[in-house]
Image (cartoon, rainbow, N blue to C red):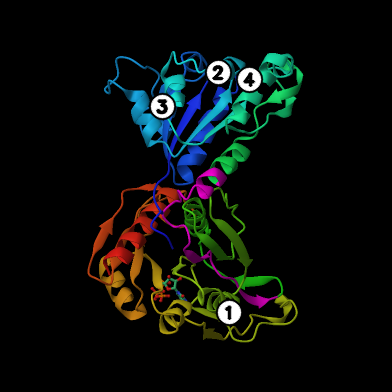
Amino acid sequence: MTDERQTPFVVLGVTGGVAAYKAVEICRLLVDAGCHVAPVLTADAARFVTPLTFTALASEPAQTELYGGPSPIPHTRLGQSADLIVIAPATAHLLARYAQGLADDLLTTTLLATRAPVLVAPAMHTEMWEHPSVGDNLRTLKDRGVLVVEPESGRLAGGDHGAGRLADPSTIVAAALGVLARTGRTPDLSGRRVVISAGGTREPIDPVRFLTNRSSGKQGHALAEAAVARGAEVTLVTTSSVPVLAVGSGSLSIVNVETAAEMHDAMQREAKRADIVVMAAAVADFRPKAPNASKIKKENGLPDLVLEPTEDILAALVTDRPPGQLIVGFAAETDQVMEHAAGKLARKGCDLLVVNDVSVPAVGFDHDTNEVVILGADGSTTTTTLASKRTIADAVFDRVLSYLSSN
Ligand code: CTP
């Protein structure tokens, strides 16, 4: 772990081409990856996409003007704050102005007022892309150390096909995060190993039937997405097939399990090397003692279903935990919520317990939103409002980091 873990500051320059709409996705992916994103639009970019769209998604309001804004010298603030400047899409006109050192608007002045690395992702029609002047300007910029994410071949505006289409937003973001990682500007979970469990376990009755619960795995998967975005090395032990969008400077490996016993084994194995363990899974508390090897037939009458308790995975993790490991439990309650939660935190012995009242509409099981209270073994209570599961995931990791720094 280094002292360099911090929020990287990225200036996202957007210039005037049809592909400017894709810069909205680039902005969102960079924010999701834990960057502070400051959008700067040229006047022509603002003809294609409104600054408001970027303002709604970015870390600070989008800027378009060199003059008349709150700061008298916005270009030096942006240029000096930047850890990286990404220009996507970069038009032929922007490449020419930048290569010539012209400084006639906020974006080009910012480009001259920075020592940060600059990454350009050109996009234009094939004829323009193949024009010698564009090639010359690009060569000049590359010779000065500017990084280029080359355009792809494909469908262009107006239905034409050819070279010049903006590279995929995820390719541009991956290149940007690679530059940030190399310059040592890393997000706040970089270097941390995080193991997360997710989904409801399935306990077989026979080869076609099982006991399970209403958990979708969405909250656990959102936790994995947030941790990858924030730079962690993540292992997700899950029963769920909900997709996980792993964008960020961290990494993700997925271990698929079905039963509480399989999840117990996987968590025991994976948690040994973890700095942070999050038990978001809804583990069955009991399972059929002797699942039938073949399908139970109804003509044989009601089956004699004898149940036995499953392992308490969280309690076992707490007992076996290596020094310094932080463990987060989850609790889904429907009544006397805080009373049950406080008892559960003490009983399980974890450091933080994320509590949701699943009797409230739009909270918990299978919803895309959640609202939680995070109880700390240090007596602290953190409350969120109703928000997306991804936002809740970030609130959990914010609390994890503040807990680690103060306990
Ligand atoms: N948990 C676990 N193993 C179990 C049951 C639960 O690891 N066999 C974990 C869950 O992943 C969660 C926490 O314990 O992080 C609390 O789960 P919950 O189902 O709310 O609590 P239980 O201990 O099962 O108690 P109860 O169902 O009676 O509320």
N-term mark: 3 or 4: 3
* Residue placed under numbered mark 2 in the picture: 94
Q: Quadrant of residue 332?
A: bottom left
Q: Are marks 4 and 1 in contact (CB under 8 Å)?
A: no
Rendered-image quadrant of the N terminus: bottom left
Q: Would you place residue 209 above or below residue 2 in this image?
A: below
Specify start and end residues of the magenta stretch as a single range: 178-206
Q: Residue at x 36, y 17 (%)?
A: 66
- Give left or right: position of 215 versus 61: right
Tag shown at residue 265:
1
Q: Is disc 3 surrounded by few (<14), some (14 to 19) or many (20+) residues within 10 Å?
A: some
Q: Disc 1 vs disc 3: which is toward the camera?
A: 3
Residue 337 in view of the camera = no
In this view, the residue farthest toward the left is 379
Q: Position of residue 110 (x, y in %)?
A: 42, 25
Q: Position of residue 347 (x, y in %)?
A: 33, 80
Mark 1 Cβ inside 8 Å of ligand 1:
no
